[in-house]
Amino acid sequence: MLFVCLGNICRSPTAEGVFRALAEREGLGDRIGVDSAGTHAYHIGNPPDRRAQAAARRRGVELGGLRARRAESEDFRQFDYVLAMDRENHADLAQRCPPGFEDRLALFLDFAPDLGRRDVPDPYYGGSDGFETVLDIVEAASRGLLAHIREHHLDR
Ligand code: 4NP
């Protein structure tokens, strides 16, 4: 499971932390590999944005140990799921996807159709409200994604 946004400091590390915590809570932590990356290189090596860390910590999820990296074409060979946070990230990733691996690429919010949105909104230039919204969306989509994984890849 690879979550991808633009900078790998706000949305995708939030998704990585929230989804990993959910999988661990449900006893599946050692069966699902989870990572995140960014389509752009601005923040490589940096920890998640302080506002993202603070918002996640209020919900019991620690992001402080994560470090930003760039998404590479090799990631499509490593991960069964490469999940873009928005349509722009999806388009950037499609250009990096090796031939034959296209079915590994999807929008994260395809796993939460009830939300009625396709993009996780970029909180970087807004206030702290944006980070709460990201967490609400990411929590819902993580539940949908885990239900999908259970149905399609696990025997329960
Ligand atoms: P992210 O947010 O893609 O959710 O990590 C952003 C982080 C940095 C920038 C834009 C969005 N930036 O322009 O530096």
Image (cartoon, grey):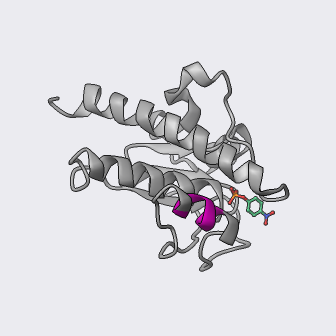
- What is the x, y in percent for residue 149? 32, 34
Q: Residue at x 58, y 55 (%)?
A: 12
Q: On screen, 100 above or below 49?
A: above
Q: Residue at x 65, y 60 (%)?
A: 10
Q: Is residue 102 visible?
A: no
- What is the x, y in percent for residue 95? 65, 47
Q: Main secondary structure of the magenta part?
A: helix
- Quadrant housing the C terminus: top left
- What is the x, y in percent for residue 127? 82, 56
Quarter of the rendered structure image containing ligand 1 = bottom right
Magenta-span inclusion, residue 66:
no
Magenta-span inclusion, residue 55:
yes
Q: Nearer the viewer, residue 46 or 40?
A: 46
Residue 152: quadrant of the picture: top left
Q: Nearer the viewer, residue 112 or 36?
A: 112
**Callout count:** 0
Looking at the image, the residue that sits furthest to the left is 155
Q: Nearer the viewer, residue 100 or 141?
A: 141
Answer with left or right where residue 91 lies relative to residue 142: right
Q: Which residues are magenta?
A: 52-57
Looking at the image, the residue that sits furthest to the front is 58
Q: On screen, 71 above or below 65?
A: above
Looking at the image, the residue that sits furthest to the bottom is 45
Q: Residue at x 76, y 50 (%)?
A: 129
- What is the x, y in percent for residue 123? 76, 53
Q: Residue at x 37, y 44 (%)?
A: 80
Q: Is residue 91 visible?
A: yes
